Amino acid sequence: MAASEHPPSWIDEAQIEALGTALADPPEVRGERAQAARLFRELPLEPDPLYRQYGYFQGVDLAGIDPVPRGLAVPVPAPSKNFVRILHDSHGTRSYVPDALVAQGVRFRSLSEIWSERGETLQRFLSRSEKPTDRLTALSAALLNRGYELEIPDRLSSPVRIQDITILGRAHEATSIHRRVRVGAETEVLLTQEVYSTSASPEGQRFIASSLDLDTGPGSKAVILDTHAPDRDAIGFYRRHATTGTAARIAWIWLGLGGRVTKARNDTVLSGNGSVVHDLQTFYGDGHQSYDSAIRLTHTGTDTHGESITRGVFNDEARGMSRGLVRIERDARKTISFISEHAMLLARGARSDTIPILEILCPDVKATHSTSVAPVDPEKIFYLESRGISREESIRMITEGFLSYVLERAPVDRLRDIIQPMLQARWERRDLYWNADGSRALPELDVTGTDAAPDWRFDAKLR
């Protein structure tokens, strides 16, 4: 479907009404759904004309999708006693918060609790960071059927591990999740958001929408690791937004390993003085997969640092687009920002577009970018073959090294070793289906490397 085409009839008023009835929507939510459904019919797929020719949204047909939660709960192992777990499947949402964290003030509100509390809680949950400007954002809001609000208090003595797992298991299902997470001052959080499928859908495509609004307090540290590994019938749309507190640190990590068509939007506002953000993204696509990633770093505070590194590998007829924007406002003095977008093509039919943009309104800053799209370096292949390594194995090693550059910069201990089996499976053209024993889920992880390196500091000569 091209961006200029009229919107397809994926949803109708009867579906929206049925979803609202099933979830017992309060009047405010019913109004939000109706408005979002109207915007879905009116808005373009891509609001910026500059990027419409790179949309890569062909082959999408979500006719018949069903947003009402129904189906059997997916069997999963018991949650670890050490961290919060939220599980979304065809049946609904299940959550577990350890008693020790509840006693320390960790507060979890489910969608039904938010609906029942109404008032300020409901308004806060519905107040998105931005109004829908494109068709998929509006569709996600209209089909909202899962979500929660999580508050982590100030100055917890130990890091908080949050595991958010989505398991697709029903044909034509539409899953739309909205999360609001607040990380208190001087508290450290590791949130993993994982998407898998129990098997391929035998009857058609399905839709997974994931939205996160993150608010970080002064001196807090938040690491958000997304593993997107559903089946080839999944159409995915991600929206992540964060606002930094003073001296706060955020690391976004994205691992794109599955799905048919995936669009991801990452927007971070560095408003707190001295705050730091790392946006690290990797993609591996083959067959007819496509990835469309948009990253925006907006510097408004002083002495802030932003880093965005994206690397994608594309084989067969796969498509990729990576667009990054760094905007430095007039009063954002002593800013350092860097954006890097690189892609490797393994076949003649593969394609990738990388578009870095800098908007600098303050002269007292450092801002750079780099970009490239190229095939595998033949000299590297020749070197490895001269050491007795086959051509296919040589290309695999070069590819893994190319992506590992991003994984090794992530502030998660042993992330490269943990992700290696997934990359190996994708290289062997195996899908990453959810295992009944839960072994597919990410294990307990440790945050590391969150302190700024000396070379990140603002050059005194520019002060």
Image (cartoon, grey):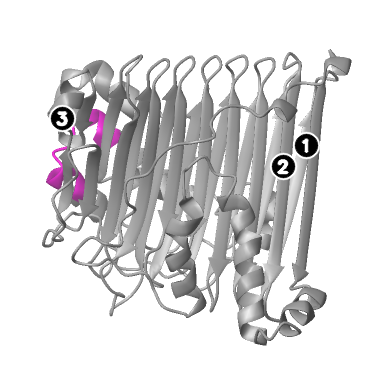
Q: Which residue is mark 3?
A: 113
Coordinates of residue 149 in the picture (x, y in percent): 28, 30
Q: Identify the main secondary structure in magenta.
A: helix
Of 21 and 405, nearer the camera is 405
Of 25 and 450, nearer the camera is 450
**Could you tell me which secondary element the residue under label 2 belongs to?**
strand
**Residue 437 lies in the magenta stretch:** no
Q: Is residue 220 above or below residue 423?
A: above
- Extreme residue in the right direction: 461
Coordinates of residue 325 in the picture (x, y in percent): 69, 40
**Could you tell me which secondary element the residue under label 1 belongs to?**
strand
Measuring 63% from the left and 63% from the top, which residue is drawn there?
Answer: 401
Mark 3 against mark 2, which lies toward the viewer?
2
Q: Residues within 10 Å of mark 3 (few under 14, many from 20)?
A: some
Q: Which numbered marker is on residue 339? A: 2
Q: Name the amino acid, label 1.
A: Leu
Measuring 57% from the left and 56% from the top, which residue is drawn there?
Answer: 282
**Could you tell me which secondary element the residue under label 3 belongs to?**
helix
Q: Is residue 160 visible?
A: yes
Q: From which residue to which does the magenta span run?
A: 19-31
Place residue 200 in its image quadrant.
bottom left
Q: Is residue 320 visible?
A: no
Q: Would residue 206 be found to the left or right of residue 417 on screen? A: left
Q: Residues within 10 Å of mark 2 (few under 14, many from 20)?
A: many
Q: Is residue 17 above or below residue 157?
A: below
Marks 1 and 3, the one that precedes in the sequence: 3
Residue contact between numbered discs 2 and 1, judged by CB atoms under 8 Å: yes
Q: Which residue is mark 1?
A: 358
Marks 2 and 1, the one that precedes in the sequence: 2
Where is the C terminus found, in terms of image quarters?
Answer: top right
- Extreme residue in the front direction: 387
Place residue 115 in its image quadrant.
top left
